[in-house]
């Protein structure tokens, strides 16, 4: 069943969309889109390290993303530079280090476009297992820390005062984010992963009025973007990542319509 | 029950230091079940910081904190909920604990906002949101309730009703209450222990003793102090919304 590369890509992509839905909502609620960007840019460094030391790509990307996240926390304690400056510093320097390292690895034939923008041809049967097993683990952990994480997202002090231990769940959340990036780098590519986190959640916000509804719609629109995007990618021979994100963008524009109508009705 | 069984929180010589400046220092206070402790003081005097120490949100840089509370509830001074979060009142009520719908409705009724249960938080006015915040804290049935200026933005009649509710909750749940309030009127009439704060504890004691204290008079002005000691005598009754005396 998984013989066809396209079926493999579809199955893996749908798995990624399901995990990206709830995490993407949290990224939007917590205003962490630039943080997600930084993690995914550093993912490229993870990939090159994986090739250099012949490690598993997902594992190496996960480790590097987690290290970058910890680095950010320690930098924030040491300097008074604003958070977004530090994120930019980390994002671009890790991306640069990754690209420099690729230059050194001239003996390996690199598909740089594939790394940056995703390549559905690269998805193997093992990757499908990784996405679905890794994704399930992420969702299970998320389920258990949800109350703490969600209350801290609404108000940190309130969550801390009422015994929710938000510092623990915040830390775990960072690792989960690193995890979803590691799972999706092959298909979406380092530059565009944040798009798959953000845009479905943004679509969902436009047309939902409770947190649960927003998560469900984010998952569904993520799946729709992946499926349509992959078909388009196959049909017109474009990279998979950009195709998926463009479809997501189109869905986002469509999701503005009900918002617009509601606004018009209220004006009357 | 002896006194120790009623103790919820004890702060001993606590303080918070931020970039080598003490925000508050030498804070000692105790909160007991069924008692209301009030923090008063000018802006920036460290009231919220002190409350956060009692709640274990901030770690004290000196002294010691004992906390025997098993369930704390908090009404923070200011909460802003981002538009990106589609949060209804009913979801917000369940934020940190599992509360069933009857309990939610009951608590919202107490603060007079049960009709807003399915409204999005963003569409509430400041006063309405404040009522929801208080209802959420009450619905948790805490043994320690910390209220940081709980009635800000609430209309005048509502303010009195909510203060009465706070007093009532204290007796009904037998919970300890730490209240930050600028409403000296209520503070002096309804609380058991008043702490007057200005970076450190200026004076503390029963409302009656505190209005005569010289540092209190210095902090709030002679005029205010005099008015309030007058209120002391007046406040053995309360008014209905139309002004008639209720008893």
Image (tube, helix red, strand yellow):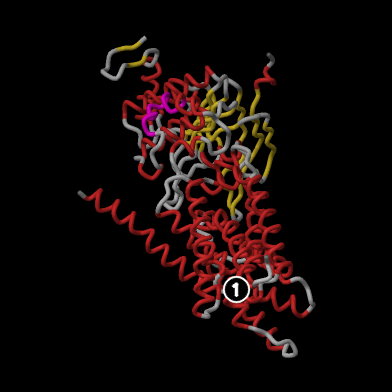
Q: Residue furthest bottom?
A: A106
Q: Quadrant of residue A147?
A: top right
Residue A212 location (% of width, % of height): 51, 46
Residue B235 placement: quadrant: top left
Apparent side of residue A17 relative to residue A199 in the rendered image (left or right): right
Instruction: Out of B196 and B6, give the one closest to the viewer.
Output: B6
Determine the chain carrying the residue at label 1. Answer: A
Number of other residues with Cα within 10 Å of mark 1, as a class: few under 14, some 14 to 19, many 20 or more: many
Q: Does A105 sit above or below residue A117?
A: below
Q: Residue B218 at what x, y percent from top left?
A: 43, 34
Residue farthest along the left direction in this orientation:
A268
For disc 1, the marked residue is A190
Of residue A41 and residue B225, the one placed in the foreground of this image is A41
| Looking at the image, residue B128 lies above or below residue A245 | above
Q: Is residue B218 visible?
A: no
As for residue A232 lying within the magenta part, the answer is no
Please tell me whether mark 1 sits on a helix, a strand or a loop: loop
Q: Is residue A68 above or below residue A22?
A: below
Q: Is residue A236 above or below residue A177?
A: below
Magenta portion: prevailing SS class? helix
What residue do we see at 68% from left, 43% from top?
A: B62
Q: Residue furthest top?
A: B247
| Residue A131 seen in render | yes
Look at the image and give the residue range highlighted in magenta. B107-116
- What residue appears at the point 41 percent right and 28 percent down from the top-left corner? B184
Q: x, y (%) of residue A217?
A: 48, 53
The residue drawn where x is 50% and y is 31% is B179
């Amino acid at each position: 069943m998984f013989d066809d590369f396209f079926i493999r890509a579809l199955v893996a992509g749908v798995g990624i969309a399901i995990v990206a839905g709830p995490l993407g909502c949290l990224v939007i609620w917590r205003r962490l889109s630039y943080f997600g960007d930084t993690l995914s840019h550093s993912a490229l460094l993870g990939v090159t390290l994986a090739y250099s030391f012949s490690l598993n790509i997902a594992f190496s990307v996960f480790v590097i993303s987690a290290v970058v996240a910890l680095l950010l926390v320690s930098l924030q304690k040491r300097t008074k530079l604003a958070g977004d400056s530090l994120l930019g510093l980390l994002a671009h320097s890790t991306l640069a280090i990754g690209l420099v390292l690729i230059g050194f690895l001239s003996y390996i034939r690199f598909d740089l476009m594939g790394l940056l923008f995703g390549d559905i041809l690269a998805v193997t049967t093992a990757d499908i297992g990784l996405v679905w097993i890794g994704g399930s683990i992420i969702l299970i952990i998320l389920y258990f820390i949800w109350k703490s994480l969600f209350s801290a997202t609404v108000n940190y002090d309130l969550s801390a005062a009422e015994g929710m231990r938000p510092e623990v769940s915040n830390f775990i959340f960072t690792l989960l984010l690193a995890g979803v990036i590691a799972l999706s780098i092959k298909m979406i590519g380092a530059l565009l992963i944040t798009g798959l986190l953000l845009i479905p959640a943004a679509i969902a916000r436009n047309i939902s009025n409770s947190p649960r509804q927003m998560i469900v719609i984010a998952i569904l629109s993520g799946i729709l973007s992946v499926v349509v995007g992959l078909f388009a990618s196959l049909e017109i021979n474009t990279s998979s990542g950009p195709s998926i994100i463009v479809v997501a963008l189109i869905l986002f524009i469509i999701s503005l319509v009900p918002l617009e109508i509601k606004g018009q009705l209220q004006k009357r | 029950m002896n006194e120790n069984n009623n103790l919820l929180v004890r702060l001993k010589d606590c303080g918070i230091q931020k970039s080598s400046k003490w925000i508050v220092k030498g804070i000692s206070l105790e909160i007991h079940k069924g008692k209301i402790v009030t923090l008063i003081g000018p802006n920036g005097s460290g009231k919220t910081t002190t409350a956060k120490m009692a709640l274990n949100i901030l770690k004290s840089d000196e002294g010691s904190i004992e906390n025997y509370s098993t369930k704390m509830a908090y009404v923070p001074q200011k909460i802003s909920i981002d538009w990106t979060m589609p949060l209804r009142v009913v979801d917000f009520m369940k934020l940190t604990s599992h509360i069933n719908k009857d309990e939610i409705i009951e608590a919202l009724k107490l603060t007079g906002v049960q009709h807003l249960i399915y409204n999005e938080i963003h569409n509430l006015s400041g006063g309405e949101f404040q009522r929801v915040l208080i209802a959420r804290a009450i619905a948790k049935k805490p043994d320690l309730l910390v209220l940081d200026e709980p009635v800000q933005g609430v209309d005048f009649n509502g303010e009195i009703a909510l203060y009465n509710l706070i007093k009532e909750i204290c007796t009904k749940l037998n919970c300890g209450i730490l209240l930050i309030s600028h409403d000296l009127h209520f503070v002096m009439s309804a609380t058991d222990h008043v702490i007057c704060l200005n970076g450190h504890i200026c004076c503390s004691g029963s409302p009656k003793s505190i209005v005569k204290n010289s540092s209190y008079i210095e902090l709030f002005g002679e005029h205010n102090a005099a008015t309030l000691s007058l209120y002391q005598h007046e406040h053995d009754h309360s008014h209905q919304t139309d002004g008639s005396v209720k008893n």
